[in-house]
Image: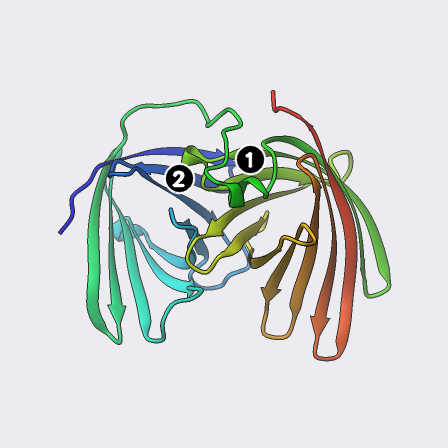
Amino acid sequence: TNHSTATMQVSWALNGHFLLLETQINSQPKAFELVVKNLDTNAKVHPYRCTWFHDDGLVRGYAGEWQPKLARMDWVPVYLPGSPKGLDIKMTDISTGPGKKQFSYQILQDKQLIAGGLFKARHAANAAPPGGDGTPANEQLKRLGQAGMWNESQTLAEGGVIKDLESVSRMRWSRGGKFLINEGVTDPTGTKAYFLWVKTWDVHDRVYRWAYFWQDGHVDHFTGYWDAAKNLITWQCVYPEVLIELREILVSPKERTWTVEGHTPKGIVSTGSGSSHYQGKAE
């Protein structure tokens, strides 16, 4: 049995569409976690989403159902990469009073309890949204990008329709420098569409993890493979009938280019390309 304390900084992102919970666990050494919570407006059951970025770069996703009479959210796993067969995780959030909550979890292997925990939290004070650019925690993370403002141009082709889009975004490193958070808007002068993504490095599987959050609450999970000879990260997102592959070339710390293809058993159904350029530190 282990006991620890932690401090959590909570903030809203993208006009209130996403809740970010950045936690520093006061262990030796200190550990850091990031949780993104949101609502999937297209889901008919378990419409809430919880994406958990662990200190070691492991990323797990859950779907939640709210029980208003109990002030309780029950979470079930929907994304557990690298987990052994038969693993199940049960999580629950409960509001226990004004400014107070409890979080509990159980990890089961083949229906046998192997670990569990209980966290009690209270609201300590109001704080300004996280600021500053921060710094990455290691060399693998440093490759992912430089904190600050970025502009991106992209061309996408699907079903005979070609779209040219511009976007502007702000990157920052979370507390502890383990997670790169990017908030942005596509077509800033026209029909605006907001997005959020988080990238990290999985120290166990030696791959990158990337969760892309759409404004409607949908989440895409990518796995990234590093090629040092080509200064290239190959990202893959797998759906039942579609494989999305994005090849990102790190031209310099302030410039990167990419190409993307969508594959089905019948062949390539979509293509795209783009480039991103660093504009300077965020104001």
As helix, strand or loop, the secondary structure at mark 2 comes to: strand
* Left or right of 222 on screen, residue 30: left
* Left or right of 49 on screen, residue 90: left
Q: Nearer the viewer, residue 281 or 250?
A: 250
| Colour pattern | rainbow
User: Where is residue 65 drawn, in percent x and y?
Assistant: 37, 58
Q: Nearer the viewer, residue 236 or 64?
A: 236
Which-is-in-front pick, marks 2 and 1?
A: 2
Q: Residue 240 has which mark?
A: none
Residue at 62% in and 24% down: 281
Residue at 38% in and 63% down: 77
Q: Circle 1: is it few (<14), some (14-19), or many (20+) Cα within 10 Å?
A: few
Q: Would you name the residue on which mark 2 appears?
A: 21
The reply to whether the C-beta atoms of the residues labelled 2 and 1 are less than 8 Å apart is no
> Whole-Å distance between the Cαs marked 2 and 1?
16 Å
Q: Amino acid at mark 1?
A: Asn
- For marks 2 and 1, the one nearer the N-term is 1
**Can the viewer see residue 69 in this picture?**
yes
Residue furthest top as drawn: 283
User: Where is residue 42 drawn, in percent x and y?
Assistant: 55, 59
Residue at 47% in and 48% down: 38
Q: Would you name the residue on which mark 1 appears?
A: 15
